Amino acid sequence: MEGDDFTPEGGKLPELKLDARQAQGFISFFKKLPQDPRAVRLFDRRDYYTAHGENATFIARTYYHTMSALRQLGSSSDGISSASVSKAMFETIARNILLERTDRTLELYEGSGSSWRLTKSGTPGNIGSFEDILFANNDMQDSPVIVALFPVFRESQLYVGLSFLDMTNRKLGLAEFPEDSRFTNVESALVALGCKECLIPADCEKSIDLDPLQNAIRNCNVLLTERKKADFKSRDLAQDLGRIIRGSVEPVSDLLSQFDYAVVALGALLSYAELLADDTNYGNYTIEKYNLNCYMRLDSAAVRALNIAEGKTDMNKNFSLFGLMNRTCTVGMGKRLLNRWLKQPLLDVNEINNRLDMVQAIVENPELRQGLRQQLKRISDIDRLTHSLRKKSANLQPVVKLYQSCSRVSYIKGILQQYNGQFSTLIRTKFLDPLEAWMTENRFGRFASLVETAIDLDQLDNGEYRISPLYSSDLAVLKDELSVVEDHINNLHMHTASDLDLSVDKHLKLEKGPFGHVFRISKKEEQKVRKKLTSNYIIIETRKDGVKFTSPKLKKLGDQYQALFSEYTSCQKKVVDDVVNVSGTFSEVFENFAVVLSELDVLQSFADLATSCPVPYVRPDITASDEGDIILQSSRHPCLEAQDSVNFIPNDCTLVRGKSWFQIITGPNMGGKSTFIRQVGVNVLMAQVGSFVPCDQASISVRDCIFARVGAGELRGVSTFMQEMLETASILKGATDKSLIIIDELGRGTSTYDGFGLAWAICEHLVEVTRAPTLFATHFHELTALAHRNDDEHLHVSDVGISNYHVGAHIDPSSRKLTMLYKVEPGACDQSFGIHVAEFANFPEAVVALAKSKAAELEDFSTTPTFSEDSKDEVGSKRKRVFSPDDVTRGAARARLFLDEMAALPIHEMDGSKTMEIASKLKADLLKDAADNPWLQQFL
């Protein structure tokens, strides 16, 4: 290895030292590895790791941020670049690749010379091999899920078979559904399931365009893995599942018979995850039918727009809804459940109200809230502990932590029993009855008895997990022998102290370490006893912290102790395996217990958030999707109001059927339009999750989907405008009258005329066809004319209702300075504040002046003036319109009626004179109606 030492963050990189023969052997092995551009391969060198070839370059560039971390291994002709990785950096790389990125996999090799073997491999969807490294010091906040998809065309309709695997919760699922050309249902399913990796067949039917499917997968930040089509097969599937599914095989066969394509996807999933190769999976999985219609649908655009998930660059956990609501979740399983709930808002009114009832009970009872929080803080991550029990390398630590967690059952039960409010029946049914059943059946008692009998709990204070010597006669004998030797060693310790005239422990210390039992004294004391030390004792080493030495007697006793201890450890290992195996038989009880505790954890977190904010949250009134309105009084954005030094200004939202179901929101940039429409979406989502909402009062009609077209997306290889159109197309095709639509500044990515035309047409479609509650924030003030069409019988919009709202801003008459008011008020805004916002952002004065001049020139350049000729107001101020919005609306409706009547004439069945007669009459009627409409007259 050549080159200067590299010291990232002040630490020197470990150096790979191989002689020429060793280097050549390793290079020969490395070059024979199969090519995989996604795989990052690391080689365990015991005290550190190395990466080679392109992987070394990737690590140097991505993690060390300098190419000077690279070294050359071997001769220049056939050598390879290498990079050393410390154990701390290895953990950083593993977390980044498996938990944050979605374009890499990780492989770990062990061995030496030219003989190496793959010992661990992981992907974002399958992190099992690396769990101990990833979560040694961090909570597992999400359950990685792998999904397999099998698209197929049948009878001119695209269908998708879907299966998923959650290895953390040991769960499999199946779903099958018709799909559109953009795979919107797939995208919603990937979001709801929390998918990290997706398998698709490499060669589908030629009639299926895989590009939209791949885009949908990448939109969700999911690793895409292509598998051979031969892997997608259902042969022997029932038999294979019978080995890993808990319970009898008959229900499994019945479930599989309900699907045609999902079973094919499941076959590929079982093969890829190699579940059958690990016998610890046998009898430990569950399988279910997954129904997409049980939860509110969210696509990746909605997740981004509503800031549901934590972002990689979030400096503050309150930037995301998960980060905000997660702040008092105490255990990893609660955090994972919260993550799942936020992506699976409920549709059933009764289920939503059940959650809200529980939150209200905890909100209204501080003792209940504080008691639960105190007890839940002492609970470990039961899901992961149960999972670790099934590993062949399991030890006593998870057994003890499960015992300590289960000891909290009686306390939690007592806290819940003290509640006697209006929701006591729900609390008893949901939580108390299951806890009491487990205690009555003495399941926890039997497990506790096992632990208390088998494990030496007194040693826990020393951080040791030992089998109690009373549990095994062989261990008891060995323990007695060890105690005898320990007594001899302690006696020798005192005799040596007397011989050297030193106090025991204070000056002469007895230690166990790499050299076995040794004595240690300080260098100062060594000077006093040096003569006797060198003549009667054996000095082992001299360091800054003192001198270590031994004696023939101590060495003999130490060897005896080590031999007995090794025998004790070997004997204990057999007993440990037995205790772990017996503890594993309680896994189903632990898993059920985890379900109860994780739900309690999330609900108490909701209650804590609702009561700890500067302005408390309120319980929303929930109505069915075909009933009620969406009314939020003094609503706030929960993430923004939680930021430091933010004085959030609340706003009302009144989406009322037949009056203001479709709202057009205008106003200056930076005035709060985007924040307002997002906070409405966030409030609706929080309510359907079962949380209180940041309002003074709220009434919410359940929505089946939230569609969001807010901000620029991240679709690769697609322009901003094209992605804007693709997202809008998804809304137009997928939204129903039971959805909620929020659209911000549609049409910015193209010319003003095209953008306005598209915005107008999209608004008309949403009003006339979709008929969903919509918040449409726009810079096209002309769109406000749509509100004057509420009484137009031809458009049938009376049961929808179009209304205008604007965000307020004030221009000081003397200074011409702009002040944002951040209040959403009824009525349209017919001002353009663009140049004022530039001033607000401290643009140079010369640039602002030129902008005003050019804007004035462009506004005057029109063949058909829209504004009065004598307007002398500045750019950005109000300008009188020649045509009133009422003229435009009535005129457009009358012109459309004329065209429809002309198009409906059965010309091929009429003679020429009759046709001219009817056409002349229609034109005369049109001219008559246009007499009092200047806008319509200009076209006649």
Image (cartoon, helix red, strand yellow):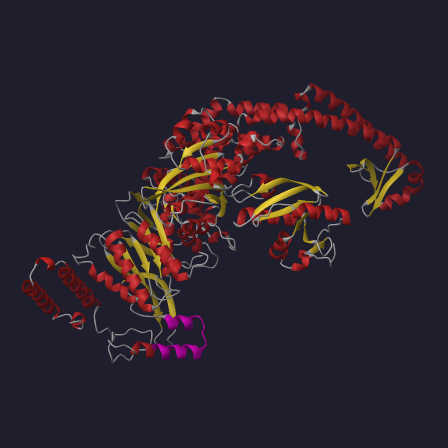
Q: Is residue 837 magenta?
A: yes
Give the vertical position of 455 relative to 639 (above or below): above
The C terminus sits in image quarter: bottom left
The chief SS type of the magenta part is helix
Q: Give the range drawn in magenta.
A: 834-855
Residue at the extreme top of the image, as rendered: 473
Where 744 sits versus 290, above or below? below
The image shows residue 562 at horizontal and vertical percentages of: 78, 30
Q: Can residue 48 be seen in this view?
A: no
Residue sitting nearer the eye, 854 or 550: 854
- Residue 581 visible (yes or no): yes
Q: Where is residue 340 in the image (x, y as percent from the top left)?
A: 44, 42
292 and 745: which is toward the camera: 292
Front-most of residues 249 and 839: 249
Residue for point 26% across, 46% down? 628
Left/right of residue 924 with respect to residue 258 in the rendered view: left
| Location of residue 805 (image quadrant) | bottom left
Q: Is-magenta flag for residue 918?
A: no
Label total for image:
0
Judge by depth and name the residue closer to the eye, 886 or 300.
300
